[in-house]
Amino acid sequence: MKIRICLPDDLVAQLKALEPEKTLSEIAELALESFVRSQQMGKKIILPENLPSELGSRQGLARMDDLFKSFSLKQAQRIIEKRLITRALESTGGNRTKAVQLLEISHPSLLSKMKTYKIDIDRDGKQNKYSSQKTDG
């Protein structure tokens, strides 16, 4: 039985960057495997943890030691919150209502955190040029 898979160009590019030696059909298999993993976990989107384990050790994927320069839990929380909020907004095309559902926080809490971390995502899910790019520390 054959299954036809349509993948967004940006997903293909990201997977191809992680696995440059893979063919398009092998990339489609990786995407399908990731999709199945995300569905098994009750998720509607593919997250990095849903990717096959062989992708997790590739260069270019941030490791915990790369993200956190100290042992400060407060600093780690700020870094993680900013990244998750940005990722949720980008994946929902800037839709804050959908983003709060993914993040499991209230809308006022999202707005407060966006202001704190200077996150400004437009309706296309892209960071606005005048937004502060570095507030991780």
Image: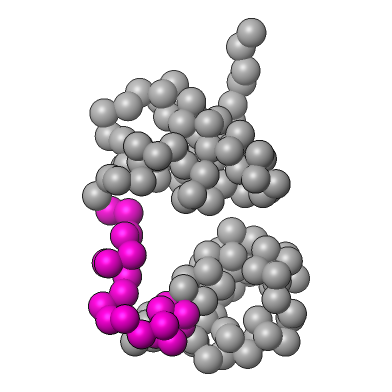
Left or right for 37, reference 44: left
Q: Position of residue 21 (x, y in %)?
A: 26, 28
Image point 46% across, 73% down: which residue?
80
User: Looking at the image, can residue 136 be seen?
Assistant: yes
Query: Residue at the spot x=66%, y=39% of the render?
Result: 40
Residue 99 in view, yes or no: no
Picture quadrant of residue 113: bottom right
Nearest to the observer: residue 29 or residue 8: 29
Q: Residue at x 51, y 76 (%)?
A: 81
Q: Would residue 92 be found to the left or right of residue 11 on screen?
A: right
As drawn, is 75 to the left or to the right of 95?
A: left
Where residue 27 appears, as percent x and y from the top left, is: 42, 29
Please say whether residue 116 is one of the residues in the magenta stretch.
no
Q: How many marks?
A: 0
Q: Residue at x 35, y 23 (%)?
A: 23
| Residue 89 higher or lower than 14, as above or below | below
Position of the N terminus by quadrant = top right
Tell me: 83 left or right of 1.
left
Magenta stretch in the rendered image: 60-79
| Color scheme of the displayed model | one colour
Residue situated furthest top in the rendering: 1
Q: Is residue 69 magenta?
A: yes
Q: Nearer the viewer, residue 12 or 35?
A: 35
Q: Position of residue 39 (x, y in %)?
A: 66, 40
Task: Name the spot of residue 19 as percent of width and height, x first.
Answer: 31, 35
